[in-house]
Image (cartoon, rainbow, N blue to C red):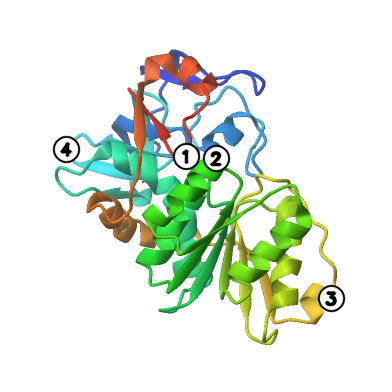
Amino acid sequence: MDIHAAVVRSFDAPPRYEAFDLPAPSDEDHAVVEVLAVGLHPRVRSGAAGSHYTSTGSLPMVPGIDGVGRLADGRAVYFVADDVLGPMANRTVIDTRRSVALPVGADVLKIAAAMNPAMSAWVALRRRVPIEPGQSVLILGATGSAGQMAVQVAKRLGAGRVVGAGRDKARLDALPEVGADATVALSEDADATAAALADAACEVDLVIDYLWGKPASEAMMALLLARSDRSRALNWIQIGSMAGPTIELPSVALRSANFRLQGNGQGAVSTRAYLAELPSLIEEIDNGGLRVNAQAEPLTEVERAWTTPEVPGVRTVLIP
C-alpha cells in the first residue's frame, strides 16, 4: 500500500515528503493506524542523522520514535514506534503491545509533544532511582525542553526542592513558574559556576543530567567537594549529552563519596517497564499536571519544519 511519509534517504539531508510503501502487518499483534500527530524531538533528529547509539545505518527510513494514531475501530492510541517503520507518515504499522489507549477527547497535540521529553525524567524518577517524598533534585540542563519538563516531573513526583541549572537566561528566569525553587546560571567562568552550584545544590539527593561533557564533570566535583556528609547518597542519572559524549572524572569522586552514577535510556530500562509507565504519564499530561507548549506543522512541510530553528520551550508536532 502506498502512503506519504517523511523519508530520509541521506543522513546528511533533512527528510522529504514523498510516497513510500507501507508494509503489511506481520502478525496479529501489528496493525495499521492513521497517524494523528508525531513529535519532532531531538531524539528523532539524531536518529534521522544516523548519530543515535541505536542507529542501524539503514536507509531509506521514515523517522520518529512515537506518535498518536487512530486504529481501525476508531480508538486513539499513543504508541511507541515499531522497528519496521517510523511514524512520520499518514499511516504506519504499530505493535499494539507497545501502545496505550487514550482517554476520549484527549489532546493529541499535547500528548505527541510532551510524552518524549517528559518520559526521560518520569521513568528515571520512578524506575531508575525512585524518588522519595521530600527529596531534592538538581536538573542539569534545565533550560532545554526535556530539562524544563523534568523540573515539573520532579515536583509532581514529590520532590521537596528542585534546582534548575542552565545557560539560557530567559528560560532560566522562567523556571520558577514551572516549579523550580532555585536556579543556577551555567557560565564560561568555571569557578563562579562551581561556587553557585555548590551554594544552591550541594545537598541534593538526585541529579538528572541532560548535558554530560565538561559541565557535568565540573558540576560533579563542585557538589561532592561542598557536601556536608559525603556518605549520604548522591544519585546521578545521566540522560542526555548536549555538551559532549564523554567526561573526565577523577577516581577520587567515586572513592571519597557515596556517589552513584548511572544512566537512563533505551537498554537501561526494559521496554516493559517503560510501557508500564505510559498510562500514568498520559494522565498527567492530559489533565494539565504537566505544562507543554506545542507548535503544529503539516507533515507535507516536513523539510521546512526540520530546518527551521525551534522556538525555545516549544515542541514541534507534525500533523499528517
| Label whose residue precedes the other's in the sequence (1 or 2) | 2
Residue behind mark 1: 65
Residue behind mark 4: 73
The residue sitting at 29% across, 33% down in the picture is 33
Residue behind mark 2: 43
Judge left or right: residue 257 versus residue 267: right
Judge left or right: residue 14 versus residue 283: right
Q: Residue 314, can we see it?
A: yes
User: Label 1 crowding class (10 Å Cα cut-off): few <14, some 14-19, many 20+?
Assistant: many
Q: How far from the left and from the top, in percent, is residue 31? A: 31, 37
What separation in Å lies between label 3 and label 1 (alpha carbons)? Answer: 39 Å
Mark nearer the viewer, 3 or 4? 3
Mark nearer the viewer, 3 or 2? 3
Q: Are marks 1 and 4 in contact (CB under 8 Å)?
A: no
User: Label 2 crowding class (10 Å Cα cut-off): few <14, some 14-19, many 20+?
Assistant: some
Q: Are marks 3 and 4 in contact (CB under 8 Å)?
A: no
Circle on res. 252: 3
Judge left or right: residue 15 versus residue 112: right
What separation in Å lies between label 1 and label 4 (alpha carbons)? Answer: 23 Å
Q: Are marks 1 and 2 in contact (CB under 8 Å)?
A: yes
What separation in Å lies between label 3 and label 2 (alpha carbons)? Answer: 33 Å
Kind of residue indicated by mark 1 = Ile
Judge left or right: residue 221 versus residue 295: right
Kind of residue indicated by mark 3 = Val
Mark nearer the viewer, 2 or 4? 2
Kind of residue indicated by mark 2 = Arg
